[in-house]
Image (cartoon, grey):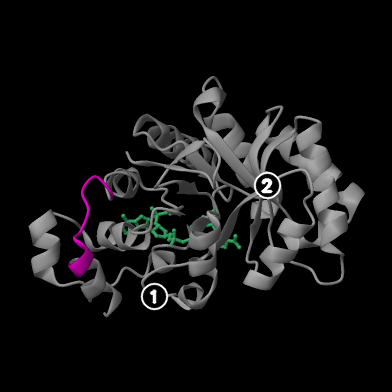
Amino acid sequence: MEYRRLGSTGEKISTIGMGTWRIGSYATPGERTSQVNALKRGVELGINHIDTAEMYHSGRSEEVVGEAVKGIRKDVFIASKVAPGHLHHDDVIAACKGSLKRLDTSYVDLYMVHWPDSKVPIKETMSAMEKLVEDGLVRFIGVSNFSVAETEAARTALPKSELVSNQVEYSLEARTVEADVLPYCSKEKLTLIAYSPLARGNITNSIPEALLHKYKMTAAQAMLNWVTRSENVVAIPKATKIVHLEENAAAVSRRFTPDEYEQLSKI
Ligand SMILES: NC(=O)c1ccc[n+]([C@@H]2O[C@H](COP(=O)([O-])OP(=O)(O)OC[C@H]3O[C@@H](n4cnc5c(N)ncnc54)[C@H](OP(=O)(O)O)[C@@H]3O)[C@@H](O)[C@H]2O)c1
């Protein structure tokens, strides 16, 4: 597994993480156990970054993550998010405490504002995020789905802490962030966490066969490899099937050349 610096901190997170949207929705205890086991397998493969949110299945995703990391909490980097309806100061604090309870842990490594909400002053939200850091409940602060202007406002609203990341949709199929958010994050040394990096399971068939053959890669691996071609980008594909997880974990063990990345960018 390849690891990258989180923002300009010394923290190392795996280039390929694990998303957990839809994890927590299970019909039987056996299905829940499979979800727990998939996350554990990911950690065995060197994936240390697990992404969740209080919004995912009303907290059930966090509960599954909490179960998966029992006994290995120190080996994993847990990222969670406060929901858009909870951005007033006291609501942020309460939301984080709720997440910690469901995750069965005393701290979250990265706590993000899930979506911006223009009705709540960002200063108020960020002062709560700083309080969580001061109290040792959160290690790093991030945002998600923030524009460049919103990210700048969030950074300005953090006098004592550094904003380390912005989590946004990015894949071969969803390229909007290339216009502004990606270059901004690269310049400012913020980690861009690419969500839905496999286009929600719509694996492209446009990648040239010769390229896949040359690197013995699947199309899904090529998508993850391409999306993480910049040093400051990591991706959080969601996989409940072990075979998918193993494929994803091996996606960045070799790299395309700059010309090949360019070729893929044009498809
Ligand atoms: N911040 C936000 O607003 C936001 C929004 C959306 C998502 N997210 C985060 O980003 C994570 C990932 O995004 P996503 O879940 O929307 O979509 P995704 O990761 O792009 O795609 C997930 C789908 O791809 C399939 N898959 C995984 N690995 C595969 C492989 N190697 N080959 C073929 N198919 C594969 C999965 O199947 P199986 O499960 O059957 O293996 C699943 O159906 C989420 O889980 C969540 O943590 C954040």
Q: Which mark is residue 110?
A: none
Q: Please rate how many residues cluster around mark 1, counting C-alpha atoms within 10 Å: few if below 14, some from 14 to 19, many from 20.
A: some
- 258 vs 228, left or right, is left
The x, y position of residue 133, in whole percent, is 76, 37
Helix, strand or loop at mark 1: loop
Residue at the far right in the pictured view: 90
Q: Please rate how many residues cluster around mark 2, counting C-alpha atoms within 10 Å: few if below 14, some from 14 to 19, many from 20.
A: some
Q: Is residue 11 above or below residue 266?
A: above
- 50 vs 198, left or right, is right
Q: Which residues are magenta?
A: 252-259
**Whether residue 97 can be seen here:** no
Identify the residue shown where x is 19% and y is 61%.
257
Q: Label 2, on which residue?
A: 162
The x, y position of residue 160, in whole percent, is 77, 43
The x, y position of residue 107, in whole percent, is 69, 31
Nearer-the-camera pick, 31 or 8: 8
Identify the residue shown where x is 20% and y is 48%.
254
Nearer-the-camera pick, 37 or 184: 184
Q: Label 1, on which residue?
A: 173
Mark positioned earlier in the residue sequence (2 or 1):
2
| Amino acid type, mark 1 | Glu
Q: What is the quadrant of residue 131 in the picture? A: top right
Helix, strand or loop at mark 2: loop
- 5 vs 207, left or right, is right
**What quarter of the picture does the C terminus occupy?**
bottom left
The secondary structure that most of the magenta stretch takes on is loop
| Amino acid type, mark 2 | Glu
**Whether residue 259 can be seen here:** yes
